[in-house]
Image (tube, rainbow, N blue to C red):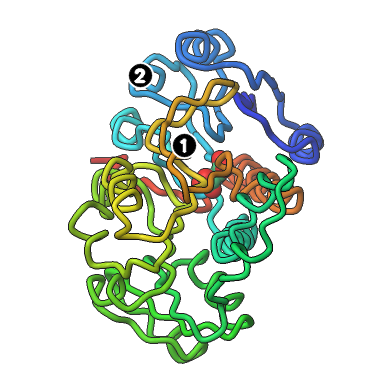
Amino acid sequence: MKVLIADAFDKSGIDALKQAGCDVIVNPQLKDDALRQALKETRCQALIVRSTKVSADMLKTAPALELVIRAGSGVDTIDVAAATDCGVRVCNCPGTNSVAVAELTMGLMIALDRKIVDETDDLRHGLWKKQEYSKARGLKGRTLGIVGLGRIGYEVTKRAQAFEMNVVYSDVIANEKVERELGIRKVPFEKLLEESDFVTLHVPGGAETKHMIGREQLALMKPTAFLINCARGGIVDEQALADAIENGKLAGAAMDVFEIEPGANEKEFKDPIPKVPHVYGTHHVGASTEQAQAAVAEETVRIVRTYKESGELLHCVNKPAEVLA
Ligand code: MLT
């Protein structure tokens, strides 16, 4: 089986694919037209990507492509509808990087409460402001609102409870099993926004969640509250967020993902939101710990190997019925 890897991918995964008898082509720089061309020329059957976008155009002109695997959990960088039309199956690696994202979420929560970024910045400028930075509110007993109780929301809950936070969640469906296991309660989305001292987003990106946090929602939050987005950029209306913070309607925010985000291998960052005071930012690295990337690679290899050996598809997001329709 010929496999094209068009993105950064853990070496352990490349070696394992070769050991499984795959003909592996690694070119992490490929994107846009060059990727379309490579799919044609290599006649690969499987494509592995992370941030690299997979468009309808690429899918339509790839002569041998059967499978696209997102080495991560979100599939919003892949035109899944077009893949379905072309009979190409799309798989992801859910759960493999949930702990890493949850860890970053906790880190950002503490960073916001303790203003760690501003403190560091002042120290680097030779300033000592012990009094100003002695006003953190602390996490214990504060309410954390988790929007989306999937695998990441679950891992965040466990960690927040270790900090003795009170966790509430909102989701389109109730997860009674997790409610019972962790002793948390589901509340309406609006109520979560009103009650929470921290709101953290863990829903998928895409049209359904676009600007789920806009002016109206931000207006419901406490002026002392913080917003954390380690999910997808478009979920937050960043102009509305900037206005809310600048007008004192929200204490601050931390973002790992942005409305304007560079693609794979692009170095320039143009999104203006981290320039707003009290907004902290990281470089879409929620899933990027060594252990998470090794786990993602392992799962990706398991998907390829299983498909190669038995034709079975693991974590396929476009169902066979749609492919056959
Ligand atoms: C994911 O969807 O799992 C992450 O966003 C992966 C990534 O960092 O590229």
Quadrant for the C terminus, please: top left
Residue 298 appears in the figure? no
Q: Which of pointers 1 and 2 indicates the residue nearer the eye?
A: 1
Quadrant for ligand 1 reads: top right
Quadrant for the N terminus, please: top right
Q: Give how far across and how far down residue 284 sits, in percent.
A: 55, 41
Q: Give how far across and how far down residue 112 sits, in percent.
A: 54, 60
Count of numbered tags: 2
Instruction: Say if 277 sits above or below 187 in the image.
Output: above
Q: Give how far across and how far down residue 107 sits, in percent.
A: 63, 61
Which residue is depicted at the point 49% across and 20% down?
64
Q: Specify the quadrant of the image occupied by residue 217.
A: bottom left
Query: In front here: 293 or 214?
Result: 214
Element type at mark 2: helix
Q: Amino acid at mark 2?
A: Lys
Res. 60 mark = 2
Residue 278 appears in the figure? yes
The residue that mark 1 highlights is 275
